[in-house]
Image: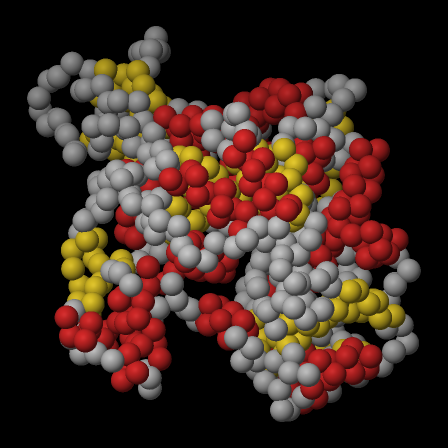
């Protein structure tokens, strides 16, 4: 409900504080003819704009005598953010040192930020007609998408927003509607946790480790945070499902956070097979209206399970009973722009505030989480055996020094691939570098095609006849001649997934090759279709980037090959070794997930390297604990606390001067170390020079005190007005 006051009517005025979504670390006072409730949205004038802010309660009128602006409209009669979410957002704004107005806005769906009413519009559902119930499914065998959609709808109605999450075709829906087999109807959303609960028939028999984990969660006398560390293929999802069952039986809700949209459909299918309860998705592929409806389903209790990416951590619930963070180590859970929060850490905080259990699951836990478990802050549950008959994959190092390579493929690897393909098995080739080649060079004069806006070379995309910068997006047609000497002898330098795909097609013409990377999955629904085809073994050879490494189940893959693992061995980023171990372990986990044993081939120029040997000989657990000991000695996270100031400017000197001005304000203290200003790993990107200033403290409390002392003083620095700057608390990416 919107209430406004005619400007001509004199009314008594209250003064309220409003958090406005602007990058200023303060709130603003406005006159209001009424007293909105705490957390209500109000429309206010701000400069030449009208913005939607959040009321933070009454303000004490200042003695300055200045004229305040008046609230234009009060948009809500009750708080739009429940107390638990409101307190979580306030905590996050304080911890990450980000303006409260932007943080509170981040907790709202887009339509609510724009001032739309916080209620449902007609939610459209789809159901089978009487004719659709009678028609034979086999009559649609020549239209498999229509056949699948009709079969799905016969199990129960769907909402239109479910089409994307269940990989159902909108064109198939149109065709079935025209045939009179399905129809639209106005769906009335549930607004209470009164769903009927039912367990599916496919609950699996737990092995002793899984049963112990489920029992430990069920026997807890108070809500805890659990680290569920399980080797790839150990059945972590089954533990999630059985732990959720008791929560759902009590009529309470479950929030499941996954790192990427690509993992949500397979998670949804597993949960739908098990539980006869309403499940909603929250991710960026939804329209603004669909996202608001799903948000309202959770808030009013109509959704039993919410599956979403990182921003779903701010979703309100009527009766939250459990939070699960899958692949808790994944860097995608950290927001890298604007409000730089970490969804995993906020999940732990929310669990503590709402007194609900939190499960952090991973085969390769982050060092921060592992340290918390070793310090007994989290309950550590381990699954050391693969579920069913699956056996751990076997590692094989291939020393490629002085060895001829075909698009990065060694002769021993090609021979191994040939044997597995002849057995009818599936092979996965991993290379975290898309495109045809990472650079274009003139064979006669050595010229390299470099991006004019970045310290980077153009990537060659052969199929599109394109040069593209993967950092700023600049692109141009693939040249025919060298820009320096005019030679036509232009060759690609290095190897990308496009080149690997082409070479494998030539080497194994009888075996189709499927490439899965950002370029091959741009079309809507392409990623899910590719993953389905890969799972069903329609393509014996899979080639891809990290998109293939995260939690996917390919039962027919028996050989996994990593073409280049050397890049991270000598990185300047202190997290590189941890990420290398996680990447190798996660990719290796795609091999041998069924009854067939798997093998993992690592191509490297440095087979004797300590990191590789430690990981292969001792496994990720021992490898991570070795890294923890190194971090302890160097006082790096989780044993030291970091904050990173970044500055970008068209002139390098401006960025340096801005960070030098910040550094000069840092108080001198024996437990505070300031590093920089120093150029970022890529100094120039998108036409701007990028510099960093790293603040390292021994205690988290000290870091917070320093930042609280520092940030108010930065508003007066003239040097910061000439640059684009940001603060990242607990930075995950130092590039």
Q: Is residue 735 above or below residue 592?
A: above
Residue 689 percent coordinates (x, y): 64, 50
- Most foreground residue, 262 or 420: 420
Compared with 225, 473 (above or below) is below
Image side of residue 45 versus residue 10, left or right: right
How many marks can you see? 0
Q: Nearer the viewer, residue 476 or 218?
A: 218
Q: Residue at the spot x=43%, y=49% of the render?
A: 307
Placement of the N terminus among the 4 image quadrants? top left
Q: Is residue 454 above or below residue 71?
A: below
**Residue 394, position in %: x, y?**
78, 65
Q: Residue furthest top?
A: 63
Task: Tell whether 597 sits left or right of 467.
Answer: right
Residue at the location (70% across, 49% down)?
384
Residue 44, by quadrant, is top left
The residue closer to the viewer here, 27 or 331, is: 331
From this viewpoint, which residue is outermost toward the left?
Answer: 9
Q: Quadrant of residue 284?
A: bottom left
Percent across and percent down for residue 161 are 31, 58
Chosen colour scheme: secondary structure
Residue situated in front as seen by the camera: 485 or 453: 453
- Residue 296 can be seen in this image: no
Name the residue located 64 percent from the left edge and 45 percent from the top edge.
Answer: 209
Q: Say whether residue 426 is left or right of residue 194.
A: right
Q: In the image, residue 92 lies at what x, y percent?
A: 50, 30
- Residue 147 shows in this picture: yes
Q: Hey, which quadrant is residue 501 in on the image?
A: bottom right
Which residue is found at the position 74% from the left and 31% from the top?
639
């Amino acid at each position: 409900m919107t209430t406004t006051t005619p400007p001509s009517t004199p009314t008594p005025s209250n003064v309220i504080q409003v958090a406005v979504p602007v990058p200023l670390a303060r709130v603003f006072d406005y006159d209001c003819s009424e007293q909105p409730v705490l957390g209500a949205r109000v429309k206010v004038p701000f400069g030449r704009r009208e913005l939607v802010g959040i009321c933070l309660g009454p303000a004490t009128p200042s003695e300055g005598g200045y004229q305040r602006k008046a609230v234009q409209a009060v948009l809500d009669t009750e708080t739009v953010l429940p107390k638990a979410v409101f307190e979580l957002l306030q905590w996050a704004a304080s911890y990450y040192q980000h303006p409260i107005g932007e943080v509170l806005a981040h907790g709202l769906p887009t339509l609510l930020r724009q001032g739309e009413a916080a209620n449902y519009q007609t939610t459209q559902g789809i159901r089978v007609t009487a004719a659709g119930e009678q028609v034979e499914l086999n009559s649609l065998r020549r239209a498999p998408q229509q056949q699948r959609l009709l079969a799905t709808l016969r199990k129960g109605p769907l909402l239109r927003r479910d089409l994307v999450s269940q990989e159902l075709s909108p064109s198939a829906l149109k065709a079935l509607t025209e045939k009179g087999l399905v129809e639209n109807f106005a769906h009335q959303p549930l607004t209470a946790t009164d769903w009927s609960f039912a367990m599916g028939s496919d609950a699996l028999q737990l092995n002793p480790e899984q049963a112990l984990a489920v029992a430990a969660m069920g026997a807890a006398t108070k809500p805890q945070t659990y680290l569920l560390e399980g080797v790839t293929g150990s059945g972590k999802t089954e533990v999630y499902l059985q732990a959720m069952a008791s929560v759902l039986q009590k009529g309470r809700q479950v929030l499941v956070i996954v790192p990427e949209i690509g993992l949500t459909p397979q998670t949804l299918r597993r949960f739908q097979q098990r539980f006869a309860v309403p499940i909603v998705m929250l991710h960026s592929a939804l329209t603004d209206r669909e996202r608001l409806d799903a948000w309202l389903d959770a808030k009013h209790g109509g959704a039993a399970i919410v599956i979403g990416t990182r921003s779903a951590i701010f979703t309100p619930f009527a009766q939250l009973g459990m939070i699960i963070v899958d692949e808790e180590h994944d860097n995608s859970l950290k927001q890298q722009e604007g409000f730089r929060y970490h969804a995993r850490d906020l999940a732990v905080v929310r669990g503590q505030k709402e007194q609900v259990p939190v499960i952090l699951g991973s085969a390769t836990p982050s060092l921060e989480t592992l340290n918390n478990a070793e310090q007994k802050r989290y309950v550590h549950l381990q699954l050391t055996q693969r579920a069913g008959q699956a056996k751990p994959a076997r590692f094989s190092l291939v020393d490629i020094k002085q060895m001829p390579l075909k698009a990065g493929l060694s002769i021993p690897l090609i021979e191994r691939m040939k044997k597995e393909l002849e057995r009818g098995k599936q092979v996965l080739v991993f290379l975290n570098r898309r495109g045809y080649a990472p650079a274009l060079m003139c064979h006669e004069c050595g010229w390299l095609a470099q991006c004019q806006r970045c310290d980077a070379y153009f990537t060659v995309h052969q199929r599109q006849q394109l040069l593209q910068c993967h950092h700023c997006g600049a692109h141009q047609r693939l040249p025919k001649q060298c820009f320096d000497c005019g030679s036509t002898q232009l060759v690609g330098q290095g190897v990308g997934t496009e080149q690997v795909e082409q070479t494998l097609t030539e080497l194994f013409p009888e075996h189709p090759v499927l490439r899965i990377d950002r370029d091959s999955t741009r079309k809507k629904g392409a990623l899910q279709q590719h993953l389905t085809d890969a799972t069903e073994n329609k393509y014996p050879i899979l080639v891809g980037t990290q998109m293939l490494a995260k939690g996917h189940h390919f039962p027919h893959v028996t050989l996994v090959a990593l073409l280049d693992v050397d890049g991270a061995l000598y990185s300047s980023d202190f997290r590189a070794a941890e990420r290398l171990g996680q990447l190798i372990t996660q990719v290796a986990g795609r091999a041998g997930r069924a009854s067939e044993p798997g093998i993992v081939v690592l191509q490297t120029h440095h087979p004797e390297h300590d990191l590789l040997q430690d990981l292969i000989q001792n496994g990720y657990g021992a490898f991570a604990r070795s890294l923890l000991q190194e971090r302890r000695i160097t006082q790096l996270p989780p044993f030291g606390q970091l904050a990173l100031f970044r500055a970008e400017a068209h002139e390098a000197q401006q960025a340096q001067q801005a960070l030098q001005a910040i550094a000069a304000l840092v108080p001198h203290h024996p437990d505070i170390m300031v590093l920089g200003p120093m150029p970022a790993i890529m100094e120039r990107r998108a036409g701007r020079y990028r510099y960093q200033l790293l603040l390292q403290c021994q205690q988290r409390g000290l870091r917070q005190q320093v930042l609280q002392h520092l940030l108010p003083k930065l508003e007066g620095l003239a040097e910061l007005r000439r640059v684009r700057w940001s603060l990242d608390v607990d930075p995950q990416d130092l590039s």
